[in-house]
Image: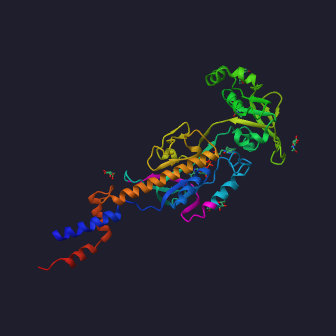
């Protein structure tokens, strides 16, 4: 009996190193999102030969836009072309895997020290990984106004850096709450001088109070920039010229007619809008991440969420920056931190004789599992005959 125990004990210490609490997973990391954030994270982990699977449901925030701008080296590249080239280059790395698909749920399965996750896709297939990166993005909530959605990213835009320049000096409109009008003027006054703020009935006493709470002296400032306020209720936006075809070296010449519930329409060539955006995916919420103001809270130094082993990058996170360069920067940052975190866990478990995460009881169970029925026969074989 003593010998049997000694034998088991020897086996256990061997196993403690072998098992060593390094969990077996399908991948080191699963990345959700194939926009610039997720692709950048995939590139970063692939260069250091981490195994990674990226899920892409192919719903990209800038999908409707004609061209991507303010991304150095790729100014004017259509977003789909940019992503396709990134995919092609990253796919050269043998540890990088990209899958068209939607992730339905992510469940933490780790022991508290070493994180692991089980990921289920729409088809019900399960995948495991040690780390999770969410680059699931935002989506814009556009009003149902006829003509608006059709023109989104094509003359009607959201960010002056993305699209303003191609329409510079053209008759311009700002659509949205009165309270947001001055903010848009402060961002676009170097691109446009003929500006109408289409505030769509929000110039009410409450609307004005809200504007004052955001910008003291808003009314005088709008006047100083020669901005006209149009308060009538918008009924539709009609395209009368398409800048996709009416374009030359000086810019893109879209033209729209804004119709109201009463009175004459007004023509403009381009618009910036102030509408809300929300998380594209419910995964952050389902995972129990802190989401406030439609942003997944992350630490700015390493893009970590409140859940161990889970990073959030790109538009989805709380950095307060929503553009392609930020998406790439934050994806890269997460890739570095998660790589080192896995290495640190591995390093720790290499030096710990007894596993940090398995109790002796669990180890014994592992031992019996590993050697199975063999133990009995081996023991019999080495038992001295008396
Ligand atoms: C009209 C428009 C024009 C723009 N133009 C520019 C520009 O010129 N320059 C610029 O810098 N920025 C521009 N932006 C901003 C830019 O689109 C975003 O900053 C950028 O796309 C953010 O990248 P991301 O990877 O975080 O998110 P996204 O590019 O939106 O990608 C999100 C990814 O997550 C995937 N996803 C979400 N949920 C799941 C799930 N459950 N399972 C699997 N996949 C999932 C989506 O399918 C997608 O692959 C523009 C935005 C708009 C709206
Ligand atoms: C994803 O789907 C697109 C469009 O059908 C296709 O072009 C692309 O090759 C697919 N990517 C992968 C990795 O299967
Ligand atoms: C304008 O206001 C009306 C009424 O409140 C609303 O239904 C509509 O969505 C708004 N349109 C835009 C473009 O904001
Ligand atoms: C703006 O429109 C709203 C909604 O129609 C209306 O209540 C308000 O009085 C208008 N404001 C001005 C200054 O005309
Ligand atoms: C481009 O087209 C616009 C509008 O038709 C015109 O005013 C402008 O001079 C053109 N610029 C060039 C460089 O052709
Ligand atoms: C985690 O590791 C610490 C230190 O190695 C150990 O004391 C603790 O018991 C471990 N926790 C779990 C859940 O394994």
Residue 232 in which image quadrant: top right
Rendering coords of residue 235 (x, y %): 76, 33
Residue at the image point whose x is 31% and y is 66% from the top = 15
Say whether residue 116 is visible. Answer: no
Count of numbered marks: 0
Say whether residue 202 is visible. Answer: yes
Q: Nearer the viewer, residue 76 or 143?
A: 76
For the N terminus, the image quarter is: bottom left
Rendering coords of residue 142 (x, y %): 67, 39
37 within the magenta span: no
Rendering coords of residue 94 (x, y %): 56, 65
Rendering coords of residue 80 (x, y %): 69, 54
For the C terminus, the image quarter is: bottom left
Q: Which of 154 and 334 is in front in this view?
A: 334
* Side (left or right) of 215 relative to 358: right
91 within the magenta span: yes
Residue at the image point whose x is 64% and y is 57% from the top = 86
246 up-or-down from 342: above or below = above
Q: Which of 248 and 362 is in front in this view?
A: 248
User: Which residues fall within the magenta stretch?
Assistant: 89-110
210 up-or-down from 234: above or below = above
């Amino acid at each position: 009996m003593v010998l049997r125990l000694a034998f088991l004990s020897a086996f256990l210490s061997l196993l403690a190193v072998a098992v060593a609490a390094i969990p077996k997973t399908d991948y080191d990391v699963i990345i959700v999102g194939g926009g610039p954030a997720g692709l950048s994270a995939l590139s970063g982990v692939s260069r250091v030969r981490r195994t990674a699977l990226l899920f892409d449901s192919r719903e990209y925030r800038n999908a409707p836009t004609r061209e991507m701008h303010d991304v150095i080296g790729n100014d004017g590249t259509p977003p789909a072309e940019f992503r396709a080239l990134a995919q092609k280059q990253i796919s050269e790395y043998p540890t990088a895997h990209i899958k068209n698909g939607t992730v339905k749920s992510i469940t933490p399965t780790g022991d508290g020290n070493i994180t692991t996750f089980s990921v289920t896709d729409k088809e019900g297939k399960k995948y495991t990984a040690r780390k999770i990166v969410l680059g699931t993005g935002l989506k814009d909530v556009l009003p149902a106004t006829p003509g608006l959605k059709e023109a989104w990213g094509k003359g009607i835009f959201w960010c002056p850096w993305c699209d303003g320049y191609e329409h510079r000096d053209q008759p311009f409109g700002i659509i949205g709450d009165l309270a947001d009008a001055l903010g848009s003027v402060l961002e676009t006054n170097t691109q446009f001088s003929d500006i109408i703020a289409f505030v769509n009935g929000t110039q009410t006493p409450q609307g004005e109070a809200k504007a004052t709470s955001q910008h003291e002296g808003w009314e005088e400032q709008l006047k100083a920039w020669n901005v006209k306020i149009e308060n009538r209720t918008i009924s539709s936006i009609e395209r009368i010229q398409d800048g996709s075809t009416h374009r030359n070296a000086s810019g893109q010449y879209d033209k729209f007619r804004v119709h109201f519930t009463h009175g004459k329409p007004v023509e403009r060539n381009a618009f910036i809008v102030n509408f809300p955006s929300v998380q594209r995916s419910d995964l952050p919420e389902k995972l129990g991440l802190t989401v406030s103001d439609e942003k997944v809270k992350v630490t700015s130094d390493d893009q970590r969420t409140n859940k161990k082993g889970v990073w959030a990058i790109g538009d989805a996170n709380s950095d307060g920056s929503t553009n392609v360069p930020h998406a790439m920067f934050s994806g890269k940052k997460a890739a570095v931190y998660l790589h080192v975190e896995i290495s640190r866990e591995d390093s720790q478990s290499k030096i710990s004789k007894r596993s940090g995460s398995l109790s002796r009881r669990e180890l014994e169970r592992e031992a019996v599992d590993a050697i199975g029925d063999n133990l009995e026969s081996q023991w019999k074989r080495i038992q001295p005959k008396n």
